[in-house]
Amino acid sequence: MDAMIVTRDLVKRFGSLVAVNHLNLKIRCGEIYALLGPNGAGKTTTVRMIMGLLKPTSGEIYVDGIDVVRYPDKAKRRIGYVPQFFSLYGDLTVLENLDFLGRIYGLAREERAKRIREILEVVELTKFRDFLAGNLSGGLKRRLSLATALIHDPPILILDEPTAGIDPPLRRAFWDLFTSLKKEGKTILVTTHYMDEAERADRIGLISLGQLIAEGTPLEIKRMVYGGDLMRIICRGTNSIMEELASLPKVIKILKRHRIGDRKEEIILVVKDFGSALPELTSFLRSHKMEPLLIEPVPVTLEDAFIILTSR
Ligand SMILES: Nc1ncnc2c1ncn2[C@@H]1O[C@H](COP(=O)(O)OP(=O)(O)O)[C@@H](O)[C@H]1O
Ligand SMILES: [Mg+2]
């Protein structure tokens, strides 16, 4: 698939601080890519460089094939951007805010009106269009800032912490919105420090201290932690079979094993993937006359993954 945003060996220093440290990103056409990391990880600095608002110390950036460092204005037109701290004109209405931006982008009156009508539907702000932006709730303000990024119908959206500080149901609604924008064909780069919502991205880049420490689908990232899925088995008297168990084709290793209660044992295995390991393990245990009391997957959260991968 074509890459819409590419950074090559991107570095940004502020004095002795390395805010972005040799970052190589490739955001594909039509995907939702979440740059996920705690405060201070370097997300905003990266985004500002991609937007051509901050000059890299070194490295290259391409947006839809355009060299951002050399042609920042040309690249910017391909992107709808919502900065982390966005400010609207509080004494203009929702409609006026959008109309004003539409003019800046040089949209003709008719086209502007049509586009604004469409966007208000997309972000579900139609019934608030005559409200003063300054009177909107936090969540609605966020919707309006997203709307402003859509006014010139850009193929790429870059959203810097669009859900920071809003409550979980609203965050979910925002991700629903991102998904529908993706269905329209947009490429979305979204930064967040919320591990849970990043699950909804197609791919995640985990960033810590300016470095990309892992990248992949949410499932791939979770599998990186242990090299596979985790499986919990509770069984009786497994001493005699442990070696054989560990050497089964789908078993990567035995992570933990300990007694629980009377002659029962809990074993945590790393398996290649839970779905195909389950029948293998079940029939293996049965063939040794060991009816397992329980076999279940052990969920690994992105938060676990983040903590374990950053500590390596
Ligand atoms: N203009 C600046 N001058 C000096 N240091 C900065 C500047 N902007 C960001 N930083 C530092 O760079 C690091 C990354 O910041 P930032 O990109 O804002 O992280 P994030 O968006 O992931 O929270 C932080 O340590 C921050 O203090
Ligand atoms: Mg930031």
Image: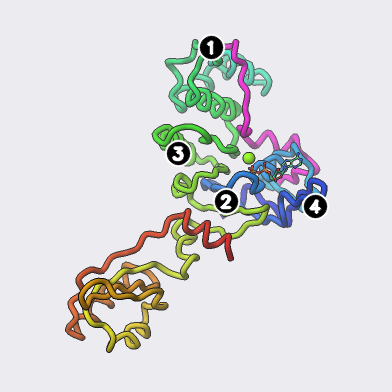
Q: What stretch is highlighted in magenta?
A: 66-92
Residue 75 on image: x %, y %: 71, 39
Q: Does the magenta stretch include residue 75?
A: yes
Mark 1: amino acid: Leu
Mark 4: amino acid: Ser
Mark 2: amino acid: Arg
State which tag comes first along the sequence, 1 or 2: 2
Q: Would you say the beta carbon of the disc 4 residue lies within 8 angstroms of ligand 1?
A: no
State which tag comes first along the sequence, 4 or 1: 4
Estimate how packed mark 1 is, as few (under 14), some (14 to 19) or many (20 or more) residues with alpha carbons within 10 Å. some
Q: How far apart are marks 1 and 2 (CA)?
A: 37 Å
- Given residues 21 and 173, the one toward you in this image is 21
| Residue at the spot 32% in from the left edge and 83% down from the top edge | 245
- Please, is residue 57 above or below residue 114 in the view? below
- Please, is residue 219 above or below residue 30 in the view? below
Report the quarter where the C terminus lies.
Answer: bottom right
Left or right of residue 178, residue 76 in this image: right
| Residue 81 visible at all | no
Residue highlighted by disc 4: 58
- Say which element carries label 1: loop
Residue highlighted by disc 1: 132
State which tag comes first along the sequence, 3 or 4: 4
Residue 28: mark: 2
